[in-house]
Image (cartoon, coloured by chain):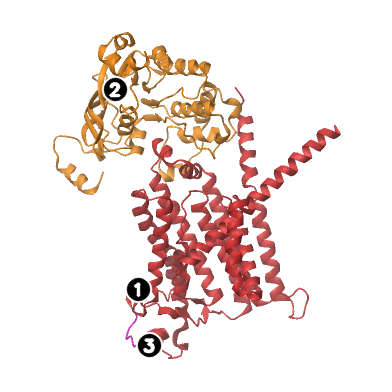
Chain colours: A orange, B red
């Protein structure tokens, strides 16, 4: 947020100033944790997002599908603050406007993200990767003085157990295999205890067996946390999804259960139709 | 599930293996410094153990360069910010010390003016400019040695890192920064002695700069500064903040999505590094006896990067060793074949980049690993 915007905000009288609401809990009294309304974004005339509306309930496991260029990753970029949108609104709970926050603030609110390509800190050990992901004060001085508490190391060991990397704890993350890096990144999300997880293609590069374990993990997370998964693998989507949202050319084409989606004529025409 | 204590043990052994060189190095540094100091003060000029004052000053100069190399290594090796303008912070620290030393001359200058340095009398200035006030106090000058480079680094870093300027663009602006300062300090109107800079220093804290004992004291001070910076930097880089810094170097976007304000980490590390460079400059000036705008030359800043690359970036001791070796080679080479030196330096840089991407420190740890591997193999064979 720049300075003039800050001054503008001081003049508005119908909402609480954002600098005063540091520790306001996420308000989910209407059961909805993520509101995306009228989102527009174009890159040099190409409409990446076109009047996109999406509501995600608290504790839901939602799958986003759609062809390449449908706007799935762009939507995640907007939600996590990486890309600014042209118009529209994104609210986390009822009070937190995500559009005037940067990536770090959004992450501190409890929105975790896993990238399409596994990105871990290769020069650090697996354990250190998880330590950095812990939910803690992320300020410069706080991290300079930080000591790992027993609960924190227990939490890390527990997550190492969950992701099956106990034996690799002291190894450098860079020496892990592709699938193990995917798991480590999921572990980094778990250890940060986010409210909302955005997961981009979790099973890319995993074996069928690993994919199944991922599916189980995601299903077990839902309820306690809200999970949004972007995935191309239809088998995988079928195995985990309660509700599926189909994106097409930057807006929502259809939403519903997997069966409804598969029988939706519009979806069959633009997406599923291609594979049949 | 493995037990917690086992885990911590394994962790500490991994980290001490990669950074264990600090303590032995500090001990070695002190032994070397003290024996040189004693060699200079206790023995006669014709004794075998005599260390000339020239050597003492040369060593002090090398250690200042080592400190400067540490500053660059911290920011480049650990955070991936290639600063090609660290010579500017070094020179600013040097100027702050130079201003103090100028004020110490008092009325012993050529023109005998008790207040104004010679070059100001020569320019027909009537009174001391406001920014020269206070530099007659040692403590004030020392505060400025840290504050001026630190403040410049803060403003520069804040603007650059907030706007997410990275990589080669950042390197180019740092070059521009040091070049702009070079041009500014060349101007007589700036009030820093123009192209002659500040020189003809007489004494520091009341001790003559020509005296052997002062020279030795300066060498020892520099060695202590190197050791302190080494230990403090090691502590910072081993803390969780150090891990965040390495994380930023590897994938800054990921660190941001974990909730770290990466720009703030970069700004503060940059300030820390600039302050170290300033201190190095302040220790350098009394030992070489002059500071002039030539220290701002872009080429100087690039040379520092070469020292660090040769020594091994990302290892603190490596940077120091690189600075010491290259500067020793420079002293030798420029005495024997001055015209070849720059080619030799350039060639060395190319060779190191091609064949020793981790520098000499990387080579040393590779050899160590090979040696350990062979030893364990031999033991297995014997068993």
Residue carrying label 3: B121
Point out residue A99 in the picture as x, y percentages from the top left corner: 26, 35
Which residues make up the magenta segment? B120-128
Residue B55, position in %: x, y?
Answer: 66, 73
Pair 2/3: label in front: 2
Please check whether the numbered discs 2 and 3 fall on a single chain: no
The mark nearer the N terminus, 3 or 1, is 3
Q: Is residue A94 left or right of residue B320?
A: left
Residue assigned mark 2 = A247
- What residue appears at the point 39 percent right and 27 percent down from the top-left corner? A194
Q: Residue at x 63, y 39 (%)?
A: B14
Q: Are marks 1 and 2 on the same chain?
A: no
Considering the numbered disc 2 on the image, is that residue within a helix, a strand or a loop? strand
Q: Residues within 10 Å of mark 1 (few under 14, many from 20)?
A: few
Q: Is residue A266 visible?
A: yes
* Residue on which disc 1 sits: B131
Q: Is residue B182 left or right of residue B62?
A: left
Apparent side of residue A172 relative to residue A40 in the rendered image (left or right): right
Could you tell me how far apart the alpha carbons at marks 3 and 1 are, in whole angstroms?
17 Å
Front-most of residues B10 and A114: A114
């Amino acid at each position: 947020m720049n300075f003039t915007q800050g001054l503008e905000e001081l003049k508005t009288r119908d909402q609480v100033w954002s600098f005063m609401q540091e520790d306001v809990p996420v308000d989910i009294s209407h059961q909805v944790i993520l509101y995306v309304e009228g989102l527009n974004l174009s890159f040099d005339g190409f409409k990446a997002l076109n009047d996109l509306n999406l509501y995600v309930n608290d504790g839901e496991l939602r799958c986003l599908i759609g062809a390449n260029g449908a706007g799935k990753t762009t939507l995640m970029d907007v939600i996590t603050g990486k890309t600014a949108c042209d118009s529209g609104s994104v609210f986390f709970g009822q009070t937190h406007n995500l559009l005037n926050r940067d990536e770090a603030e959004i992450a501190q609110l409890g929105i975790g993200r896993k990238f399409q390509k596994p990105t871990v800190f290769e020069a650090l050990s697996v354990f250190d990767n998880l330590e950095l992901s812990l939910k803690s004060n992320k300020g410069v001085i706080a991290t300079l003085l930080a000591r790992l508490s027993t609960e924190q190391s227990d939490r890390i060991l527990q997550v190492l157990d969950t992701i099956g990397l106990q034996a690799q704890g002291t190894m450098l993350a860079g020496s892990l295999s592709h699938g193990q890096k995917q798991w480590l990144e999921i572990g980094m999300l778990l250890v940060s205890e986010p409210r909302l997880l955005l997961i981009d293609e979790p099973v890319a590069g995993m074996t069928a067996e690993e994919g199944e374990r991922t599916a189980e993990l995601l299903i077990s997370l839902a309820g306690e946390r809200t999970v949004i998964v972007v995935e191309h693998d239809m088998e995988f989507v079928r195995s985990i999804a309660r509700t599926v949202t189909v994106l097409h050319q930057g807006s929502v084409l259809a939403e519903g259960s997997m069966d409804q989606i598969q029988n939706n004529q519009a979806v069959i025409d633009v997406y599923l139709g291609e594979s049949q | 599930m493995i037990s917690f204590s086992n885990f911590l043990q394994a962790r500490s052994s991994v980290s001490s293996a990669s950074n264990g060189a600090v303590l032995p190095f500090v001990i070695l540094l002190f032994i070397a410094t003290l024996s040189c100091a004693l060699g200079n003060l206790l023995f006669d000029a014709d004794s075998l153990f005599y260390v000339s004052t020239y050597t003492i000053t040369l060593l002090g100069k090398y250690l200042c360069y080592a400190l400067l190399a540490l500053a660059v290594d911290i920011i480049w090796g650990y955070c991936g910010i290639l600063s090609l303008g660290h010579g500017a912070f070094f020179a600013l620290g040097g100027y702050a010390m130079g201003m103090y030393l100028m004020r110490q001359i008092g009325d012993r200058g050529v023109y005998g003016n008790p207040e104004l340095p010679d070059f100001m009398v020569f320019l027909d200035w009537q009174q001391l400019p406001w920014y020269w006030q206070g530099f007659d106090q040692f403590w004030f000058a020392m505060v400025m040695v840290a504050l001026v480079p630190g403040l410049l680094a803060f403003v520069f870093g804040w603007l650059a890192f907030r706007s997410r300027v990275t990589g080669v663009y950042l390197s180019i602006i740092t070059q521009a920064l040091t070049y702009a300062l070079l041009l500014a300090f060349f101007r007589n109107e700036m009030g820093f002695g123009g192209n002659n800079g500040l020189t003809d220093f007489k004494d520091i804290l009341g001790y003559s700069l020509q005296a052997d004992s002062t020279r030795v004291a300066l060498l020892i001070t520099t060695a202590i500064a190197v050791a302190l910076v080494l230990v403090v930097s090691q502590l910072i880089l081993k803390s969780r903040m150090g891990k965040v810094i390495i994380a930023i170097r590897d994938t800054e976007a990921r660190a941001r999505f974990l909730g770290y304000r990466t720009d703030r980490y970069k700004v503060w590390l940059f300030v820390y590094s600039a302050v170290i460079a300033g201190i190095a400059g302040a220790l350098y000036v009394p030992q070489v006896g002059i500071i002039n705008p030539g220290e701002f030359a872009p080429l100087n800043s690039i040379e520092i990067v070469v020292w660090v690359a040769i020594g091994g970036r990302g290892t603190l001791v490596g940077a120091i060793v690189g600075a010491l070796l290259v500067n020793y080679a420079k002293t030798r080479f420029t005495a024997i074949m001055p015209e070849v030196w720059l080619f030799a330096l350039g060639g060395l840089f190319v060779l190191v980049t091609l064949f020793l991407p981790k520098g000499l420190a990387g080579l040393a740890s590779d050899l160590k690993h090979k040696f350990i591997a062979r030893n364990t193999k031999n033991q297995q064979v014997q068993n």
